[in-house]
Image (cartoon, rainbow, N blue to C red):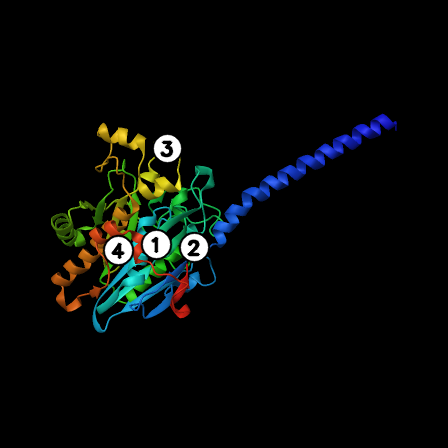
Amino acid sequence: MTNGRKDAMSKNLAWKILFVAVLVLLAVAAAVPIIRHTRFRYPVVVGPGVTRVARLSDFGPGLKGTRADTNVYVLEGREPGGKALIIANTHPNEPAGLLAALIFLENAEVDKGTLYVIPNFNRSAGLDTKPGDGYPHFYRIPTPWGEKTFRYGSRDASPLDQWPDPDVFIHYPDRQLLSFIDARNTNRTWPGRPNGLLMERVTFAAMELLRNNQVDVAIDLHGAETMFPVTNCIVAPQSASRLATRVALFVKAREKFDSHVEPSPYGFRGLSHREIGDYSDTLPFLLEAPIPFLDQPTGPKTEKLLLDGRDPFLLKLSERGKLFVPYDETGWPIDKRVGQHVSVMLEIFAQYSRQTPERSLSLRGVPRYADIVKNGTGYYFHDPKKADASRVYEE
């Protein structure tokens, strides 16, 4: 072999090694932020109202040892009474519900009845992300003691936890045919089953919590696009529609914001506001707050847009009557969305207690819409560094 040929082969080998090294570096650079997101945990400082912390697997053993298992916080009152469940992060890319649930965990004290709170219902989706859509991995909420950082999750459970997706998701027990991706969507797998897909086991465990504890009211917190007609509303089945209507009227009159009522459809299965009412005695409600971040015709999907909800393209669409909510230069800031969720939940508890005094739920210490808009969501979060370590939990 000539020296020239040897030199050419050496150069080719060197280029191949360099090419592989560059690919490895790019893969590592892409993987590090995702790994950091998945492993990140944020502290929750539970207030004096939290009397114990359970796991969702306590109600559905099929979740034990999986990444879908999650904390269930219990706030037991001084007197017996009604029972309610707050579910947040069914879709972890809709953060107002999580923040509203945490306000209850860190501040509420129950005088009568029992409140259950699941802040990370689809925990698997909360540990996942959508980098292909340019979503931020984290968002930060200002507080009096500094910024509090949260993961920004995905809508559906991670394929690392539930895979492969079926060609068609067949809803149990009605056998309605749904999209394959709905198999990982915990607002399509209700009422679930104990030995089904992982997300079916999540919703089955929640149903067991509701049935075994005779929970009166369940509230599922969401966010929906401003271009989607079912937004800024309370979704309820016929059994809960009168109560939902009273709630909408009271918050409109007293707190000056709209949250209209939408009926739960009979023909669309798997939804919390449909299946909870059909398969238990619990009255279900699903709350939607506008989230401009999820609208398609927006600018870059930045943390700023996620939090302030201000976008020039949506403003133009609003001027042309294309949105389903009022929209101006102020956007839809996170404090407004969180405040609406909190006040609507408080009003649901109040109206249910008036309707059923023998099963009333009485609590205090939770701010309402005007206070949250004025002070900011972060004002109601406590500094974990100054808290009793036994009252700090990781989510």
For label 1, the residue is 143
Mark 3 neighbour density, 10 Å: few (under 14) some (14–19) many (20 or more)? some
First in residue order: circle 4 vs circle 2? 2
In the image, 335 versus 70, the foreground residue is: 335
C-alpha span from label 2 to label 1: 36 Å
Kindly check if marks 2 and 3 are in contact, taking CB atoms under 8 A apart as contact.
no
Q: Residue 237: give its label.
A: none
For label 2, the residue is 198
Left or right: 372 with respect to 351? Answer: right
Q: Residue 299: give its label.
A: 3
Tell me where residue 101 appears, x and y as whole percent: 30, 57
Image depth: mark 2 or mark 1 in front: 1
Query: Residue 385 appears in which quarter of the rendering?
Result: bottom left
C-alpha span from label 4 to label 2: 22 Å
For label 4, the residue is 219
Q: Which residue type does callout 4 highlight?
A: Ile
